[in-house]
Structures are given as structure tokens and as C-alpha cells.
Image (tube, rainbow, N blue to C red):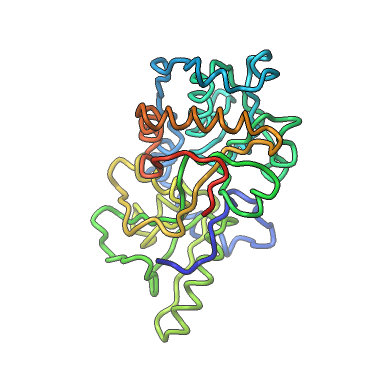
Amino acid sequence: MSSLRPRRRTLLRALPFALGGAALAPALGACTHASERLDAETNAIPEVDLGGIEEQPELAALVPQEIRERGELVNGAALNYAPGEFVGSDGEAVGYDIDILAAVGRVLGLRTRTESAVFAQIIPAIGSTYDVGISSFTIDPQRLEQVSMVSYFAAGMSYAVKSGNPYGITPPDLCGSRVAHQVGTYMDDVVVERDEQCRADGGSGIVDQPYVGNADAATAVAGGKADVLIGDSPVIAYAVDRSRGTLEQVGDIEDAALNGIVVAKDQPELAEAIRAAVQHLIDSGALREILAAWGNENGMIETSEVDPQQ
């Protein structure tokens, strides 16, 4: 198990122009037919049928009166984190988080609406602008001081290689490997830390291959231009699922942590209603079906809790 610090949602942060062309050189070489195919697959939106999910009156009764009368649950999400939440080709919010939100709404007899937001500005707006925030938030003590969080998914860091693992990658050992990842994410820190440890132990350092997008990084690995792809487990699982067999996962999910739906601390009734709805989706198998459609059933949890201590 890696000793890296706890996971945090940092995907798709702005890329500093000062990095220049040198840091992004691998990505420039990835614009091939294979790249276009992987891009197309990664951007594919699965069809998730929520028609079988019915309102549960005893759970709907837990929803605060104001929200019940409004009939709508408003969500704030940063729509830049595929496959969790992102903007589809029609301009609408899509992703497994958006489908889970819709499923929770059906259980509670509510419509759902997602508004695009800056990630760092979602939690301060919970309880005023937004009823909830479902946007791949990792549950941690700092956030639990500000808001309540309902667990629904588990995520960490994982690895993918070209099918057959031709370079014999055995995570977490990356020494001497060409490591592809999306620039501007937490993986930048992972590569630096692993490289320093490799060299301190007297081994070969890591060949860092940052790419502008995860699809380019995945294409480099599928095409043999890099040895291994690293990233957040939902992103890696989705890339593998959409790779048409050119990629496979290796090793375990590292630094796994629960993701949570954010609710205002002064709305315990709403938090309990959402927890009960998520548990219903778990018990009925609907949550697994949603996650499987997005290639992320490995993130399933058995029990949903309000403010779980990790």
C-alpha cells in the first residue's frame, strides 16, 4: 500500500503556460488515428435506464417540507471530471454522479437539476444556492467541519497498462518506467514523490510523460509510447472500459477513500433522506448498474453513512 497522503479531487486544474512545449511534447505526438478512436470512446455517453427506479413514499417523507413543496433537488457540480460529471455533446451535465443524483431524486419523488459551478465554491454555497453537492468530493475531516457528507462511492489511485502488460509493471513500483498521466492533477505530485523514492533507493528514476488530457495519456500507453497510465481510479476504470481491450488495469486501488454527497450541516433530515435513498439504490442493485454502465462498479460500497469517520 502506498504511503502517499490522502486522495483529493484535483483533476483538470489549469495548465500553466510557463510549462511550454517541452513539458507537453508527448501529447503532441499522440494525435494519431488511435488517439482519435480512444478520444471518441472516452467521450461516449452510456445509456443508463432509470425507469425501473420508483419513489419510496416512506423515504420521500423524510425530505424537508420546503424541498418537498418545491419538488426539486438542486445540485452544484464542477463539470470537468469525466466520468463523474462533465458536459455532454448536447451541452447537458452527464456522468455517473449525475445519474446517481437522478436516481436519488426518483427514490425521493423529486426532480433534480445540476448547475455548473467552480469546484472550490460549491461547499460554501450548500444550503443557500444548492441543496446538495455531488461532484466527486472526497470525505475528509476538514470538509466534515463545514458540511455533512453522505457516502456513496469509493475512489483512489490506480494504474492501467497496454493489454498483456508487456513491460511487466508491478504497482506500486514504477522505477525506470515511462509514466503517462494528465498534467495539472495530483498525479504530478505522485510522479515526483515516486521518482525521488526510486533514486533514494538507488534505482532508476521515472520517465515522466505528462499529457494535456487523460485520453492522450491513455492512447500513449495503448500505443506503446508509455509503459503505464496513472490517475484517479474512476478515470482509469473509464479509460479501460472504453479502450476496446487495448488497456487493462494492474495492481490495487491505492489510498482509497469514500466520496460523499454534500449537505448543509443544519439539514440533518435531508442528509438522512439522501442516505436512505442511496442505501435503497445499493440494496436494489440500481447503484451497481449505474456504476457498471460507466465502467466503475469497483467503486461500489455496501453501506451508505452520514459523516462516516475514515
Residue found at x 58% / y 39% = 135
- Taking the image as shown, residue 293 lies to the left or right of residue 21, namely left
The quadrant where residue 253 appears: bottom left
Quarter of the rendering occupied by the N terminus: bottom left
**In the rendered image, the vertical position of residue 69 relative to residue 4, given as above or below:** above
Viewer can see residue 31: no
Residue found at x 43% / y 39% = 42
Residue found at x 48% / y 63% = 209
For the image, the number of numbered tags is 0
**In the rendered image, the vertical position of residue 294 relative to residue 35, given as above or below:** above
Q: Nearer the viewer, residue 277 or 14?
A: 277
Viewer can see residue 28: yes
Query: In the image, residue 22 lies at what x, y percent?
Result: 58, 64
Query: In the image, residue 294 lies at what x, y percent?
Result: 40, 35
Query: In the image, residue 24 lies at what x, y percent?
Result: 55, 59
Q: Nearer the viewer, residue 296 or 177?
A: 296
**In the rendered image, the vertical position of residue 210 relative to residue 37, given as above or below:** below
- Taking the image as shown, residue 136 lies to the left or right of residue 239, namely right
Query: In the image, residue 109 lies at what x, y percent?
Result: 54, 15
The quadrant where residue 34 appears: top left
The quadrant where residue 17 appears: bottom right
